[in-house]
Image (cartoon, grey):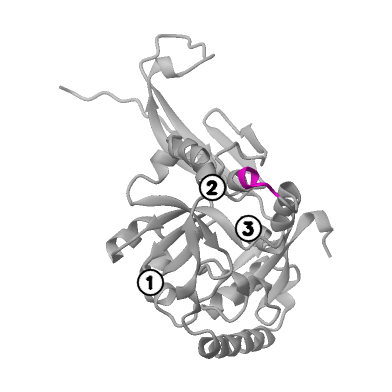
Amino acid sequence: MEETNHAREELWLLGQPPLRKYLDFVEDMVIDGAAASPAALAEEWRTANDYYHELEEREAGIADGIEYRDLDPALAPLAAEVAADPRYRCTFDTLPTSFGMVELDRLVLCQIHVTRNFVDSLKARLGAAPDPETLFRFCIGLGPSEAPVQISRLGSTRYLFRSDSLDCRFHESALLRPDQICDYHAFGQVVGVVGVVVGFSTNLLNVIRDDKRLLLHNGYHRACALRELGIRHAPCLIQTVTRRDELDLIAKDHVAEDPKFYFLARRPPLLKDFFDPRICKVLRTHKMTRMIEVNVEARDYLVPE
């Protein structure tokens, strides 16, 4: 058995398709999961799936009644500060967006597991009774990530980025002018610099609005932390779609491929399901580290004019 600091607890919603995803996750990620009985796992998944059918009858249309309203005008300067940030403008530059207060319990889910350890750390960071400004910055702030990143040079053209945050990612490659580079001393005249950009996402609590429903797109751990602290409404960014082509631009692939499941099903998975012991299971999993390896290749050759 592994030590606690090398393990995490994952909250997983049973009964949601596909079953194969659940079986693979247990086998690959859960501590001692390879020894678990596939038949037993499938049976508990079926039991939860049957319970969802009960919820379809008892709570049909519940997602359509979600409450959301405008932000308190006192928070308008904070919203304007976020909207003016280049990271916001680069990320949310295509569809209509707004800021508002949304009900947490009836947010539709497209992600069926969250890391318990991370939820607990967010609760401790926020505290039990945050004031409106603190709550806004917790949900929609653009401050620096607190997750450390280790950068190693593996060779003359190989570099490794390592972080405990799974949000660390490759952004893009960019062509930079020499005047954009500081504190670099070249052995000759520099005509251009090709950079590989690695960092974190614009990690705002945000939802996709399609008619009467709001689908939680990003900020699952913060939403769960707020719910556990007894906070039922939270400030968030709202992106509005009116047709399928727009959904293809911003939603995760599995949402864009099956929008009816999330926006038309009688009773889709909701945030409050993470707090229902009949469908939410705690899985003890291996701790994961994000590693991004960058390899630089340059070729020099002559061509006739």
Residue drawn at 22 percent across, 25 percent down: 303
Q: Quadrant of residue 195?
A: top left
Q: Answer above or below: position of 279 versus 142.
A: below
Furthest residue to the top? 188
Chief secondary structure of the magenta portion: helix
Q: Amino acid at mark 2?
A: Asn
* Disc 1: which residue: 259
Dot 3: few (<14), some (14–19), or many (≥20) neighbours within 10 Å? Answer: many
Q: Is residue 143 above or below residue 272?
A: above
Q: Residue at x 37, y 58 (%)?
A: 240
Indicate the secondary structure of the residue bearing disc 2: loop
Say which of 277 and 190 sits in front: 277
Label 2, label 1: how far apart the Cα atoms are: 23 Å
**Mark 3 falls on what kind of element?**
helix
Q: Amino acid at mark 1?
A: Pro
Asked whether 13 falls inside the magenta stretch, the response is: no
The mark found on residue 221 in the picture is 3
Left or right, residue 12 beside residue 7: left
Secondary structure at numbered mark 1: helix
Magenta part of the chain = 130-134
Q: Which residue, given by chain and number where applicable, does mark 2 sit on?
A: 203
CA gap, disc 3 and disc 1: 23 Å
Q: Which of 290/221 is in front?
A: 221
Which quarter of the figure has residue 9?
Answer: bottom right
Res 4 visible: yes
Horizontal side, residue 10 vs residue 24: left or right: right
Where the N terminus falls, by quadrant? bottom right
Mark toward the start of the polypeptide (2 vs 1): 2
Q: Crowdedness of circle 1 by 10 Å Cα count: few (<14), some, many (20+)?
A: some
